[in-house]
Image (tube, rainbow, N blue to C red):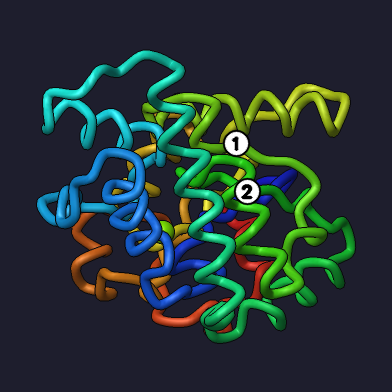
């Protein structure tokens, strides 16, 4: 039996569904900051880091990509995201709360953290809207790195810091809803629970060979994740 030191959760499509608030806030920021309505229409958002999305947008339109330009866009995005979430926060994904409670009830509860492409402030806005922010003790975010695989590495480092002892990557389980979640877990040697509550179905996720795949977190008792 493997230990289970930490569970690292993706946000969109895994913990919550905002009904596309993030994507709309991005589109509105493109218009507000750069006068480009529809300027993000060509972009594919799921599984991506916010920072890589901003860069893709700026590059696509031939705009400057300095850290200041990135920040200006993200500031506008976050303000708009806050407004959209205040109007409509969306919902927690099915069984999220019962899964978290089941994790907490384990004999040796794992550290609960985040592994997300959202920038930290965006993650906080989205999760606070559902009372979920305080559940997570640490995490890796889209402002740690543009490359999701390196966000995973940052999350693992913080888990180790937080626990205060060495952690085998195999004893960490990433929970996510996209092939990119599976890929970034593999990049750090973690195991993966894929959940089909986002944009991808069970069969589609299965082709990326996660350790487990379910259509709803309620279908898997977290104790099972200890088994290799
Ligand atoms: Mg997701």
Point 28% across, 28% down: residue: 55
Point 26% across, 63% down: residue: 205
Q: How busy is the neighbourhood of tag 1: few (under 14 within 10 Å), some, or many (20 plus)?
A: many
**Can you tell which quarter of the image residue 56 is in?**
top left
Whether label 1 touches label 2, CB < 8 Å:
yes
Q: How busy is the neighbourhood of tag 2: few (under 14 within 10 Å), some, or many (20 plus)?
A: many
Would residue 79 appear left or right of 35 to someone viewing this image?
right
Q: Is residue 148 above or below residue 5?
A: above
Point 40% across, 33% down: residue: 51
**Can you tell which quarter of the image residue 183 is in?**
top left
- Identify the residue under disc 1: 140
**Can you tell which quarter of the image residue 121 is in?**
top right
Would residue 100 appear left or right of 204 to someone viewing this image?
right
Where residue 164 sits in the image (x, y, percent)? 88, 25
Front in this rendered view, residue 153 or 54: 54
Where residue 134 sits in the image (x, y, percent)? 82, 59
Q: Mark 1: which secondary structure?
A: strand
Label 1 to label 2: alpha-carbon separation: 6 Å
Q: Is residue 21 above or below residue 153?
A: below
Point 59% across, 25% down: residue: 154
Q: Is mark 2 within 8 Å of ligand 1?
A: no
Q: Quadrant of ligand 1?
A: bottom left
- Identify the residue under disc 2: 114
Front in this rendered view, residue 60 or 161: 60
Where residue 52 sits in the image (x, y, percent)? 32, 32
Where residue 68 sits in the image (x, y, percent)? 45, 18
Would residue 111 appear left or right of 7 to someone viewing this image?
right
């Amino acid at each position: 039996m493997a230990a289970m030191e930490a569970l690292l959760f993706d946000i969109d499509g895994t913990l919550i569904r905002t009904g596309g608030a993030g994507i709309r806030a991005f589109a509105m920021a493109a218009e507000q900051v750069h006068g480009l309505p529809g300027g993000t229409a060509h972009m594919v958002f799921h599984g991506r880091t916010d920072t890589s999305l901003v860069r893709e947008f700026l590059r696509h339109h031939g705009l400057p990509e300095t850290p200041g330009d990135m920040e200006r866009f993200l500031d506008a995005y976050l303000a708009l995201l806050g407004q959209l979430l205040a109007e409509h926060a969306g919902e927690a994904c099915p069984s999220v709360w019962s899964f978290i409670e089941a994790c907490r009830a384990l004999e040796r509860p794992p550290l609960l953290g985040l592994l997300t492409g959202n920038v930290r402030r965006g993650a906080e806005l989205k999760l606070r809207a559902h009372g979920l922010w305080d559940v997570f003790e640490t995490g890796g975010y889209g402002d740690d790195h543009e490359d999701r695989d390196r966000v995973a590495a940052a999350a693992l480092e913080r888990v180790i810091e937080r626990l205060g002892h060495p952690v085998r990557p195999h004893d960490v389980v990433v929970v996510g809803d996209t092939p990119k979640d599976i890929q970034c877990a593999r990049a750090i040697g973690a195991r993966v629970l894929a959940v089909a509550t986002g944009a991808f179905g069970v069969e589609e996720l299965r082709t990326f060979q996660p350790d487990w795949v379910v259509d709803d977190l309620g279908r898997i008792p977290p104790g099972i994740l200890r088994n290799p």
